[in-house]
Amino acid sequence: MTTTATRAGGATPAFPPIWLRDNCPCERCRDPRNGQKLFGITDLPADLTVRDTEATADTITVTFGPDGHRGVFSRAWLEAHLSTSDGDGRTEAAKQLWQARDLEGRLPAADWAAYRDDPAERARVLRAVRDLGFAVLHGTPTEEETVLAIARTFGYPRETNYGTLFDVRVEANPGNLAFTGMRIAPHTDNPYRDPVPTLQLLHCLANAAEGGDSGLVDGFTAASLLRADDEAAFRILTTTLVPFAWSDASTSLRADRPLIDVDPAGHLREVRFNNRSMQALRLDPAATTAFYAAYRRFAEIIARPELLLTFRLEPGDCLVFDNTRLLHARTAFAESGARHLQGCYADLDALASALRTLEETA
Ligand SMILES: [Zn+2]
């Protein structure tokens, strides 16, 4: 038996009794102080029915069988749940995919003081990170550790074996190519972690070197182009677990994940792309050959000039970007020139939470 919440003049969609009961808003079902459910699924009768419904202009009261339990539902709430969900905002379904020409000369950016002091401006910046994958703050203090203070405006720095922050500058004995003046091709960071850091911040303290410009590629755009061009290659990259690893004397990190992660509906959710830390695959020869062909096709798309958005970080600029979606890059620079960035990792869930809170109180 099903019940109906009628839409004026519309169809009469059915809510199954178990769904209604699981969402019953009464005080015995939900703690009114926090809205949390007070029961588990096996506490509900297996043979639930809707015995009766009574409608008013604003509510529908449901009486359940076999136990006679009653719950009063808001019609507005029921109607808001008629359509399928657009999800939690993490997949391509909620994103604005871009190529370089879409954003050249109009990067999503804000002045630090306005961001710090104006909730509407802060919401605009956080929305850009959510929807476009990044934003730039100008005019932040050029003092060390400022990057951590910026991360704390919307979330929490994620401490790793690199510390709570890392310095990106030329080192005499570099443990990572980032700490040289070499060109760094577009990549995502730390694919050898599970979970991967979902956000990265890069704060520029000095950039007097010739070169050393920054670049971003929308990995979702690249993956969607691959899907359109070569669906078989796309499928290989969504289904092949690729081993990534990083180690030094005190650390040995490893995660096996696909280069392109999709949700059960097939929507792009995460991209990993970092040849520096990819380890030897252990697949049968045919699968290995097919993987490499697909990987090359994806890499060729990522390398298309029209996908690479380039810009220069000046002292006081802080780039905040989605490390599960955007690939970042750097042009080569003279190691004699002063270039110093400080970076940290943080996470998208806290940023999305900060944004929702700002939007709900606006
Ligand atoms: Zn109830």
Image (tube, rainbow, N blue to C red):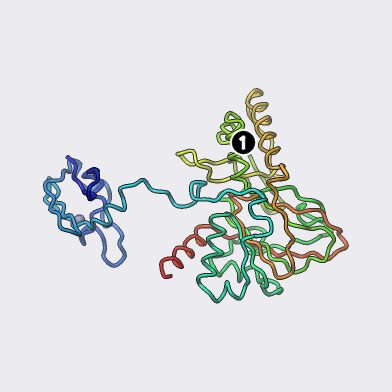
Query: The N terminus is located in which quarter?
Result: top left
Quarter of the image for the C terminus: give it: bottom left
Residue at x-position 55% and y-position 51%: 96
Placement of 349 over or under 10, stated as above or below: below
Q: Look at 44% across and 66% down and name the residue there.
A: 357
* Residue in view at x 26 percent, y 50 percent: 22
Residue 351 is situated, as x and y percent measured from the top left of the image, at 52, 62
Q: Residue furthest right?
A: 336
To which residue does mark 1 refer? 226
Mark 1 surroundings: few (<14), some (14-19) or many (≥20) residues within 10 A: many
Q: Where residue 263 sits in the image (x, y, percent)?
A: 48, 41
Ligand 1 quadrant in view: bottom left
Horizontal side of 92 relative to 225 (left or right) equals left
Q: Nearer the viewer, residue 269 or 85?
A: 85
Find residue 227 and report its image quarter. top right
Up/down of 249 relative to 224, above or below? below
- Image x and y of residue 266, in percent: 49, 38
| Whole-percent x, y for residue 60 in the image | 18, 54
